[in-house]
Image (cartoon, helix red, strand yellow):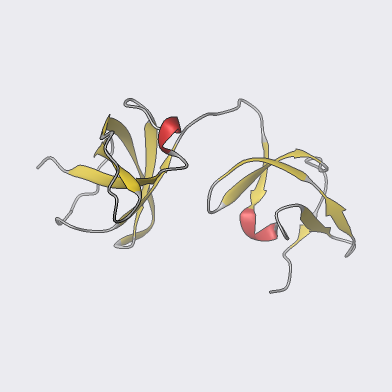
Amino acid sequence: MFFVLELNIDENDILKVKPGQQVFIRMDSYKNEVFEGEITSVDPIMNERTRTFTANAIFKTQPQVLFPNLSVEANILISSQEKALTIPRNYLLNDSLVTLSDGSKRNVQTGLMDYNIVEITQGLTDNDQLLLPKQ
């Protein structure tokens, strides 16, 4: 069976989304798995109620069992770098600080990020050890 993913894209991000882009898909029903997909079309008309645009995607790798109307979280690859220093986003304080293993804080500059991972463009090396901030 062929499933089409209907994705709601915020108006701030719509200019970055184009057919052919790679999509990483997470689903509540498959908690620890990530599936690959591809954007197939972008509807240029905004939904005025939700202030979002609709993009359609298809699975490249599909779960064995799917049901219509399941919710998904989709991360669309808008750019990539060959070598990037990344950290889990929950290690970042106020979008610009990290806590080093000795307890001190350090300012960092960030690049691309999603809900889980953030690129660090300045302020850390791959030898720095971090502590998870207390919530």
Q: Viewed as shown, does residue 41 lie left or right of 105?
A: left
Residue at image location 52% in from the left, 29% down from the top: 79
**Placement of 76 over or under 66, stated as above or below:** above
Q: Position of residue 44 (x, y in %)?
A: 28, 33
Q: Position of residue 12 (x, y in %)?
A: 47, 42
**Placement of 100 over or under 11, stated as above or below:** below
Position of the C terminus by quadrant: bottom right
**Placement of 121 over or under 9, stated as above or below:** above
Q: Name which quarter of the figure residue 35 lies in.
A: top left
Q: Viewed as shown, does residue 33 lie left or right of 134?
A: left
Count of numbered tags: 0
Residue at image location 72% in from the left, 59% down from the top: 94
Residue lying furthest left in this view?
1
**Placement of 71 over or under 21, stated as above or below:** below
Residue lying furthest bottom in this view?
135
Position of the N terminus by quadrant: top left
Residue at image location 24% in from the left, 45% down from the top: 6
Q: Position of residue 120 (x, y in %)?
A: 72, 41
Q: Viewed as shown, does residue 127 lie left or right of 53?
A: right
Residue at image location 53% in from the left, 53% down from the top: 115
Q: Name which quarter of the figure residue 91 lies in.
A: bottom right
Residue in the foreground of this view, choosing between 62 and 121: 121
Q: Position of residue 69 (x, y in %)?
A: 18, 57
Residue lying furthest front in this view?
48
